[in-house]
Image: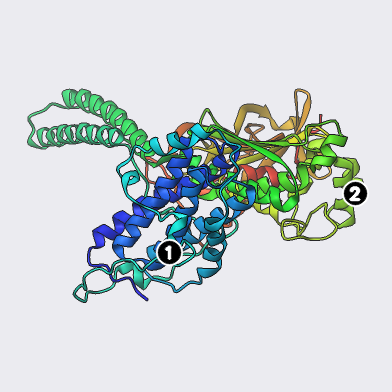
């Protein structure tokens, strides 16, 4: 039924606070399992659930109150030392928090769904009647756990103790005074958001909003003020020119100064706006401890997940798109890379495997790596499986380098498993990874050593809105090539070109460089006489190189990327478009598509 809340602002505040608490809760619970004697962490978890319970009780969300109340009781016993934390108890607590997330997601969707919660509550109740833990723990530990409560919420009598008949259901929350009928919130007209995450966990984040530091807003306002001043100066110059009070020489000098100042202020304003869109990659990373824990339990493996660089910032549009590829890579590392404890011991390794997830800035890109110390990639087995599935021929395999054999795992339908499971084996996961990374104009590289482990390296642009580009001319048409993919430019004599197997190539130092003529790719009519000399723009994707043959180099320029719309979205070799200073539209070349479709996957050494 639709939510009937008299104070919509109060409801929005509840959702914002609850979402923030629940987003942090998974991380805290996983950390608690490894450090169950941390009183500060235990109390923070207790306060989070207590706050959600109190706010939901005030607003009359009975289902949410019942679940959080029982969960709070269990956490209260844990923090007092009356219950010893085990992996089984943590499973029940995590299941309860997943149910809380689901109920909050229903409220956010504008509907109260009558969900079945008794199954989860019935798992919590035995933990409240269980006998206290044996006094093996130091007796002095219990008082500090209670005394360390430092928030106002902790001083309330939040949870009934076990002797107060905990097996009974808590009394219904006090009903709110009847409110006058009013239209349901706008959100109630929309269907509830789809549920995601592992083991029932829901993604409660709001993809339409982003938090911004007040200082960044102040900086933005300052730059807007500077822009207003320059606008006023431009208006004054125009009035002077129209009124004949300014000679052309003086006007030219003043206009030149104004143009430089406008350029500077616009660049600063652009930088401030881009910073406002940046959010920490922690938004994506925070869900992986829970995922790794669940997968380790399902696969019978012991895994130590280490996360670095959570504070690294990335454009919101990129952050929203990298979640699925990273989940597939984590699953791949857990299922195919890391061994079972017995296999690791037999191989002379520690029984617990290590999985490292890291992010770092590098120039105008962000590097995200997923590294494990597992069995590594067996290229011989990969090659055999690719032949068995008809993805390549034996002749193609014989001509492949090791890096090209690594790339076979990204082919649609490829899997080293003979039978598909719930986790992997269908040959779609790694294909999804490459497709999504390519849509982001990113690159993926694999490093692996058999028996030592593997590392998947993602190189992603900081933003998808504005890029540095190299403008080139092809028979009178202007194209934009992302500068991040440009390795070098050359002026060469076309008489040095050779044809090998129907592919134009150029011998460049110690490699054979495949060539792609843009006028042929985009069907541009020739408007100039054939000239022996032309320019080559060498672009790269991972270890692959291709030379784009162009008529002239126009120069470097920062451009804003514009979408071509759904009808032209899948044109091969085109990543978008931009508008030049003279009003003309220039297409933006897709470097990854050019390299993959350039016949020369890599230069022959």
Lower sequence index among marks 2 and 1 = 1
Secondary structure category for the residue under label 2 = helix
- Find disc 2 in the rendering and name its residue: 384
Instruction: Name the side, left or right, on which 276 lies relative to 90.
Output: left
Give the colouring mode of the picture: rainbow
- Separation of disc 2 and disc 1 at Cα? 56 Å
The location of residue 67, given as percent across then percent down, is: 46, 62
Q: Residue at x 19, y 25 (%)?
A: 254
Compared with residue 130, is residue 103 higher up or lower down, i.e. above or below?
Answer: below
Q: Is residue 314 visible?
A: yes
Compared with residue 336, is residue 182 higher up or lower down, i.e. above or below?
Answer: below
Q: Quarter of the image holding residue 174? A: bottom left
Disc 2 residue crowd, few under 14, some 14–19, many 20+, Cα 10 Å: some
Q: Quarter of the image holding residue 352? A: top right
- Find disc 1 in the rendering and name its residue: 66
The location of residue 268, given as percent across then percent down, is: 32, 31
Quarter of the rendering occupied by the N terminus: bottom left
**Depth order, front residue of 510/212:** 212
């Amino acid at each position: 039924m639709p939510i009937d809340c008299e104070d919509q602002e109060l409801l929005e505040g509840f959702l914002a606070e609850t979402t923030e608490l629940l987003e942090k809760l998974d991380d805290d619970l996983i950390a608690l399992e490894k450090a169950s004697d941390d009183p500060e962490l235990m109390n923070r978890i207790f306060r989070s659930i207590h706050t959600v319970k109190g706010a939901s009780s005030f607003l009359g969300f009975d289902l949410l109150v019942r679940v959080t109340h029982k969960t709070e009781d269990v956490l209260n016993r844990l923090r007092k030392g009356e219950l010893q934390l085990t992996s089984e108890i943590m499973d029940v607590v995590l299941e309860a928090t997943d149910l809380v997330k689901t109920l909050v997601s229903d409220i956010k969707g504008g509907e109260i769904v009558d969900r079945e919660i008794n199954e989860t509550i019935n798992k919590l109740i035995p933990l409240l009647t269980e006998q206290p833990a044996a006094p093996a723990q130091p007796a002095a530990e219990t008082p500090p756990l209670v005394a360390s409560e430092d928030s106002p919420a902790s001083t309330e009598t939040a949870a009934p103790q076990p002797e107060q008949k905990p097996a009974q259901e808590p009394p219904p929350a006090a009903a709110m005074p009847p409110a006058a009928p009013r239209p349901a919130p706008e959100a109630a007209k929309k269907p509830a958001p789809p549920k995601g995450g592992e083991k029932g966990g829901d993604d409660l984040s709001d993809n339409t909003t982003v938090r911004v530091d007040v200082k960044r807003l102040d900086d933005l306002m300052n730059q807007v003020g500077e822009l207003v001043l320059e606008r006023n100066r431009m208006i004054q110059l125009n009035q002077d020119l129209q009124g004949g009070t300014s000679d052309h020489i003086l006007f030219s000098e003043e206009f030149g100064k104004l143009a430089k100042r406008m350029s500077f202020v616009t660049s600063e304003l652009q930088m401030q706006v881009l910073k406002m869109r940046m959010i920490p990659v922690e938004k994506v990373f925070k869900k992986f401890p829970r995922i790794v824990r669940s997968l380790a339990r399902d696969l019978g493996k012991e895994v130590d997940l280490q996360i670095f660089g959570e504070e690294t910032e990335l454009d919101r549009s990129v952050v929203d798109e990298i979640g699925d590829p990273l989940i597939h890579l984590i699953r791949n590392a857990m299922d195919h890379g890391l061994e079972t404890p017995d296999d690791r011991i037999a191989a002379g390794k520690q029984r617990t495997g290590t999985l490292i997830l890291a992010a770092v800035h590098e120039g105008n890109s962000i590097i995200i790596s997923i590294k494990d110390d597992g069995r590594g990639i067996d290229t011989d087995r990969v090659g055999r499986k690719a032949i068995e599935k008809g993805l390549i021929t034996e002749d193609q395999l014989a001509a492949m380098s090791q890096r090209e054999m690594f790339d076979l795992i990204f082919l649609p339908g490829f899997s080293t498993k003979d039978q598909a499971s719930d986790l992997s084996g269908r040959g779609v996961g790694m294909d999804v990874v490459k497709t999504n990374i390519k849509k982001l104009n990113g690159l993926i590289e694999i490093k692996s050593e058999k028996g030592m482990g593997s590392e998947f390296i993602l190189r992603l642009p900081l933003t998808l809105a504005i890029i540095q580009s190299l403008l080139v001319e092809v028979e009178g048409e202007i194209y934009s090539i992302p500068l991040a993919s440009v390795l070098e430019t050359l002026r060469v004599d076309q008489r040095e070109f050779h044809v090998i197997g129907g592919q134009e190539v150029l011998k460049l130092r110690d490699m054979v460089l495949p060539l792609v003529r843009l006028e042929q790719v985009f069907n541009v009519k020739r408007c100039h006489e054939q000239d022996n000399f032309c320019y080559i723009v060498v672009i790269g994707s991972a270890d692959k190189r291709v030379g784009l043959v162009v008529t002239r180099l126009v120069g470097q320029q920062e451009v804003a990327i514009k979408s071509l719309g759904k009808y032209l979205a899948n044109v091969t070799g085109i990543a978008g478009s931009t508008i030049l200073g003279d009003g003309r539209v220039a297409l933006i070349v897709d470097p990854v598509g050019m390299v993959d479709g350039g016949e020369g996957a890599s230069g022959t050494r």
